[in-house]
Amino acid sequence: MSLIGVPTAGFAAAAVVVQSTMATVQEQLRYDLGHAAAQMRLAGPDLPGMRQDPVEWQLTDSVRDSPVTTADEDSPWADLLGHVPEGADAIPVRTTRIVVRGPEVPVAVTADEGATWSPALDGHWHVLSGRAPSAPDEAMVTPATLERLHMSIGDSITVTDPVRERFTVTGTMRDAATGPEAEGVFLPSGSLPADLPESLQRGGSETTVYLPEVAPTWSEIRSLNAHGIVVESRPVVLDPPAERLEGVPTGTTVNAYLGAMALVGVFAAFEVALLAGAAFLVGTRADTRTHAIITSVGGGRGFVRAVVAGSGLVLGVTGALLGTALGTGLGVLAFRLLDDGNVGTWPGLHVPTLAILTIAAVAVSAGLVAALVAARTATRIDVLAALRGSLRPAAPRPRAERRRRIWVPVLVVSGMVMTLACGVGVLLLDDRPVQQDRWAVLAGVGVALGPCLVQLGVALASPWVLAGVARLSARLGLSARIAARDARRNPVRTVPVLASVMSVVFLASVVITWSASEHARFVRDYEYATAVGVATIDVGASDADGYPAGYDATLTRQAARVIGGALGDADVHVLAVNREGPGKDPTTVTVPHDFAHRECPTTNTTTCASFLQSVGTGTPHITAGTLDDYALLTGHRPSAAVQRALADGRAVSLWPEYVHDGVVRIDTWRDQTVDDTEPYEDTRPDATTTIPAIADVQTPRIQVGVFMTRETAAAHGITLIDGVLATHLARDLTPAGYDALYSAWEGTGGTDRDLQSTVSIAYERGPVDEQATVQALVLALAAAVTIGATAVAVGLARSDGRRDDEVLDAIGAEPVLRRRVSAWQAAILTTVGAVVGTLLGLLPIRALTLRFDGGPTGTTHLPSVADWPVLALLALGLPLVVTAGTWLTAGRGRRVAVRRAH
């Protein structure tokens, strides 16, 4: 009953928790609109042709050859408030970024400008304490903002950018889709300038207009679409028209959740059927005398089967009821503990009745199926022998043995061939330009089904395997010999456990091998920006329209001072770099010449690195600085040759593609803009400069193309501008550290906010393996199921081997012998199952990586890599832990009470 009830409880709890993360339509509307009837937002220019989806209202499409398809940056945009239905109330809300004075440094926070505290919007925003503002110089904040600013209700906050104003805090509130740690300020309408610089805009600083009482109809929404306005209307979402956009996903999250639950449920039902079936077989064997009595008094085979199957049905129903009740309660408790008020994560408590009933039905079915095999066995007993009390092992059946000799090789060979063939088929189908069919899915099913056939064949061969182990265990002592022979002579309770451990470890091995292969591909394709431990800060600027405006030396040095102080007086290096990305205004572009000019169908980290292919994308390929700057970027002391080259006015090429015959060539294009119809790299340069150079190729290579001193660049007329900062950090910044750094930078003020908006920080960690948590979770789950299966095996062995214990006790065996027998049996079953399952887990990944060529253009080959230390821990360490646990818990410290039948 526990075998049925515990998994059922787990699935029921998971169903409640997962379902509670999925918002219903009403809950989504509750957050989107609060108590309002609709909301409006600009989504495109004021031209006909745009249309929206009635439910997924922010998804839009354009009518073919309509005016909106030819829109450009000069196309007009509608006045959103001017299209509010006549006589309707409207609440405009704009979200942006502001800088407020903090206790130590200025703090950048999100600001919602508008009457977000209106009762009509309660649900999207929620007032927590205090009162709503009633004057233009009053505002509300989140509790986390009060804490960060060391303030309380009634104090005043000072906004320093984009305006300098003081606001009295009248209360606290927060966005309902944020957690308690969210920071934000809520200002009255008109508190900020109408036109904000791009650096302060969040999502285009778009304004959303909420309509508290009037909900546009679908025909009115289509009319607004013609002006570039999208609308979410409560009645339209609740009763949508049939005019849905093509390709709009419907129920994707729910379907993925149901699919994942179904896969895990099938596997769990298989495990429960195996172990519960073994328990029923042992119970049936213990009740052999009872079944013989029923038969002797006239009970037919059908009646005996009904008795045994009925017990499975009763236990299945009981386990299902208890499991679903306990699981539902645990799910509700977990929701209450995890719910932090963020409706984006926890929209509401949902108890999925249909899913729980399905789980209960599967549990009942698993109990019934597990009992059917035992019911069939119960009708094959020798009635006279059972009435005399004989419990001799069942005699081997030659016919069953012959069938096993045929099916074992057939299943193993066919399963391996199917896996490899379908794996190659998946690769061939995925290599096609068009993949919109189901053949790849069918081939993938074959990759999953093949190992299952192999496992079934191994399970059928388990008696042979256990017989071989029994022969080998003769040299390991009395307890090992007894355990092995007991396992071999009682396959009804040992083979299901071995198969269960094998299947669990197989899945764990597949996940671990896939994780190791993906990480190997990540490491193989990883390109280092600098040496590990170096943080680089790009201080590139942009103009008012968002186009790149190059670098500004004054701004870069200001950033060096601010960021150095924010990092605790860190040694920040200022690097001069070239301008590669053209802007809206005519710009001079300078790049190093690539003498190799390779055509790269696929990328790699050396000859076809993406860094080599990124010329013209804005990434600098020329860097100027000092010898210390070079040492920082490369992570080691420069060689004597590099020191002499830099001192002599030569350049250093870190990529062999940029140096030829002892020189590097710098190409320059003048008056380039983003509107040029022909890319500059496809035209002849306006000027070319050659500089004597040496090669110093790094291992691994870093994203620094050509390095020289500022004096060398000036001597050859190469225009470089201070635009990149670099510093060494002992470790990557925490989210709080990044937040403090950005806040310190944004809080420096200044009139040209756009130049400060493009500061970006990158820390080079190297190809860090992010799969350790996944592997630990997989090992933990495999250990839990394996321990559970082994506990079942040991318990069944002790129950079924009661008379063996009595015999051992009668001839003077110590109680510790029974403990050793249990430990050895656990070791045999888990080791055989874990080793076989681990080896089989290598098969699917090898099938999916069995590529004989490089593949088509643009594909990256997944290598087949086995994480042998983790797999060894799975195959050998896990059985060792289970055996140790069995030794500590199995057996009795006293002699058994001998039963005597008279």
Image: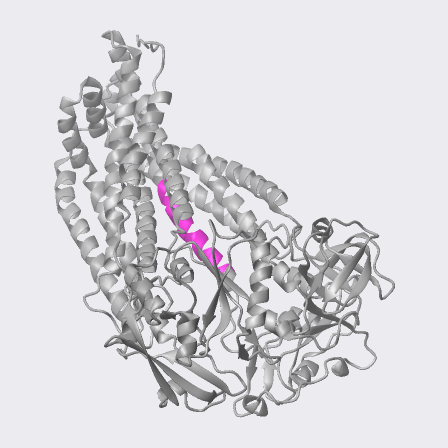
Region rendered in magenta: 254-271
- Residue at 32% across, 54% down: 514
- Name of the residue lying farthest toward the right: 135
Is-magenta flag for residue 729? no
Question: Could you tell whether 42 is left or right of 571 in the image?
Answer: right
Could one spot residue 607 in this view of the protein? Answer: yes
Could one spot residue 492 in this view of the protein? Answer: no
Q: Residue 827: horizontal and vertical position, in percent?
A: 27, 29
Residue 639 sits in quarter: bottom left
- Residue at 29% across, 23% down: 822
Question: Could you tell whether 742 is left or right of 767 in the image?
Answer: right
Is 627 above or below relative to 794? Answer: below
Report the predominant secondary structure element of the magenta stretch.
Answer: helix
Question: Could you tell whether 299 is left or right of 261 in the image?
Answer: left
Q: Residue 110: horizontal and vertical position, in percent?
A: 68, 62
* Coloration of the structure image: one colour
